[in-house]
Image (cartoon, rainbow, N blue to C red):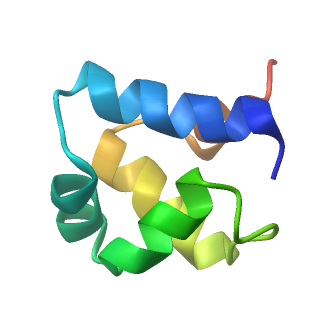
Amino acid sequence: MSSRSLENIKKLRNKKGWSQEKLAREADISYQTLIKIEQNRIKNPKLQTLIKLAEALGVSLDKLVGVKK
């Protein structure tokens, strides 16, 4: 994933005032997976994981990964 995508996930999470634990819970993904994604230790997260994160954060997948329309 690009660094912009990672920044978007962190920015959106912080905008909601959520901890990593809270986002992981809301997205129904493991805390360790979220940490690895935010630290860019998972280079290509599964699409389903990104969809869960986008839904939990209330944004489109495009916005989550930083795609400009």
Numbered-mark total: 0
> Picture coordinates of residue 39 (x, y %)?
61, 54
Residue drawn at point x = 70 percent, y = 38 percent? 5
Q: In this view, does 15 lie above or below 44?
A: above
**For this view, does 61 lie left or right of residue 35?**
right
Q: In which quarter of the image is residue 19?
A: top left
Residue drawn at point x = 71 percent, y = 71 percent? 42
> Picture coordinates of residue 11 (x, y %)?
45, 24
**For this view, does 21 lie left or right of residue 30?**
left
Work out whether residue 35 or residue 16 is closer to the camera in this orientation and state it: 35
Residue drawn at point x = 70 percent, y = 68 percent? 41
Q: In which quarter of the image is residue 57?
A: top left
Q: In this view, does 64 lie above or below 35?
A: above
> Picture coordinates of residue 40 (x, y %)?
70, 57
> Picture coordinates of residue 61 (x, y %)?
61, 46
**For this view, does 38 lie left or right of residue 13?**
right
Image quarter (top left, top right, bottom left or bottom right) of the C terminus: top right
Work out whether residue 50 or residue 9 is closer to the camera in this orientation and state it: 9
**For this view, does 53 lie left or right of residue 17?**
right
Q: Is residue 59 above or below residue 42?
A: above
Residue drawn at point x = 30 percent, y = 52 percent? 56
Work out whether residue 60 or residue 34 is closer to the camera in this orientation and state it: 34
